[in-house]
Image (cartoon, grey):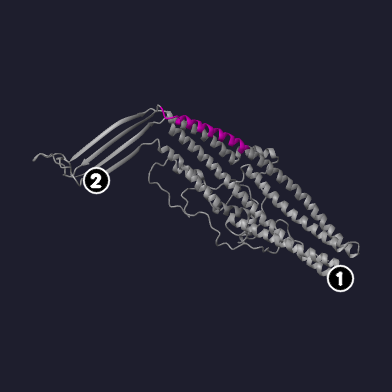
Amino acid sequence: MHDPDPKSPRRRSPWLAGLAVGALMIASQAQAETLQGALAKAYENNPTLTAARAGQRANDENVPIEKSFGLPSVGTTTDYTENIIIPGNSFSSPARSISAGAQLSVPIYQGGAVRNAVRAAKYRVEAGQADLRATEASVFAQVVGAYMDVLRDMAIVQLNQNNVSVLKTNLQATSDRFEIGDLTRTDVAQSEARLALAEGDLRTAEASLIASREAYIRLVGEAPVDLQPPPPLPNLPATAEDAVSVALTSNPDIEAANQLVSASRADIGTAKAGRAPKLSATLGGGYNNFLGSLSSGVPGLGVSQETSSAAAGVSLTIPVFQGGRPSAQVRQAQSRSSQAIETYVATERDVIAQTRGAYAAWQANERIISATQQAVSANALSLEGVRAENSVGTRSILDILNAEQEYLNTQVQLVSAKRNSYVAAFSVLAAMGKAEARDLGIEGGPLYDPAANYERVKGQIWDWADDPAPQQQATDTRGVAAADASVPAGANPLIGPVDPAREQ
């Protein structure tokens, strides 16, 4: 689809450099999807991003609009008149006439209104470009979250499937031992109850997987197929304060808020111009032709059928009293400037809190991963021990069932912690202003450069320089099949190979 704006060359990032080997493998697996590929698809096709780009292009146009109020304007008029009824006492009225006129108006001084309005518009363009960066980071964070959600929920479905298989084996073994009188009906009932709960948990996990896949489709525009392990994230800070230090200089929300403060100050100058003198110059001319219908009223005496005129002048307007409107507009602009300043402070606070919170969540989940890995190993060993002890009669069937559940719970906790750690780490980069397309080495084409469109239109003064008719940029998902809860066999990127059902 047509995009009227040129784009800048893409800049590569060391992030995902480790995928070079993976890319060779993916070439032979056309359906495999990497996180970088998902981000690239979202960058090109996500409607939130394409809408934000269109909104910024509209924002760019405020600069030439404001400039136009300080430029000369030229207008022409043409009239044709047919006098249907001529008064009886009029002896020289023409029956028809055609007239044409032109006027050039040149604003000379407008009290600084145009200059300040243009400055404010330029600041808002820069704020909009920063907002577009923030939108990119937000969409990418959502894509990373959706990508990791699918991997996590696939792993949880696999774990629950394996658990159901294990419990079915347990139930069969318990029933066999009950038949020979080695166990009681209570043991069978406990196994049946635990299997029923496990099957319910599996259905819940499958529903969560479907929801995660649909969220992925909404963001990326395609179904997730054979998702590959996510790559390590680059340039993560050593401390929370390091992250905050970078965020205060690079976060796009702070940059946008700062530019809006500057724009609001320029707005005060625009408002003050409302009580300043205005000076303009005009030049006009006219032409009339009575098409031979003008008579002198005296037989035999002809008159000229054509007339021309020209005039030039200077107009000075000095406001004396306007009912208090200018001062009200100045006070209003001052209050809005105060609002922008406080909004900047609030934005800075939010960014600091978000950065520290994301860093804390990342570090906490890293510790949770370490602890949970130990718990998984311990629970696996415990389960083996409980089974062995049951075989010699020192442990009950309920002990085995509880050990199975604890082992499953810690595996699910580990998968969730890995997902949460990665998403939190990416959120740290986003808060630092380092999770945009220019930072992530997005491949597949040139990066969208909002400054290119601004440079294209900022000096445009031609009245007929329209862009092509708007066309849809984002892809729709009507043709994407509904997500299901199927899970391919084999290892999961978050948990590796799932243990086969352990027989009792």
Q: Which residue lies at the image location 59% right of the left edge and 63% below the top edge?
A: 481
**Residues in magenta?**
321-348
**Residue that carries the numbered disc 1 in the rendered image:** 178
Tell which residue pokes out farthest to the left in this image: 300
Tell which residue pokes out farthest to the bottom in this image: 179
Give yes or no for residue 332 being in the magenta stretch.
yes
**Residue that carries the numbered disc 2 in the rendered image:** 80
- Count how many numbered circles sit on residues in the image: 2
Q: Where is residue 298 in the image (x, y as percent from the top left)?
A: 10, 39
Residue type at tag 2: Tyr
Vertical arrangement, residue 424 with respect to residue 481, above or below? above
Could you tell me if residue 501 is visible in this image?
A: no
Q: Which residue lies at the image location 53% right of the left edge and 34% below the top edge?
A: 336
Give residue 339's quadrant in the image. Answer: top right
Q: Is mark 1 on a helix, strand or loop?
A: helix
Query: Which badge, 1 or 2, is on the more N-terminal residue?
Result: 2
Q: Position of residue 203 (x, y in %)?
A: 70, 62
Q: Where is residue 225 in the image (x, y as percent from the top left)?
A: 63, 60
Q: Where is residue 159 in the image (x, y as percent from the top left)?
A: 74, 60
Picture quarter with the C terminus: bottom right
Q: Which residue lies at the image location 53% right of the left edge and 54% below the top edge?
A: 474
Label 1 and label 2: CA atoms lie apart by 110 Å
Position of residue 378 in the picture relative to residue 483 (left or right): right
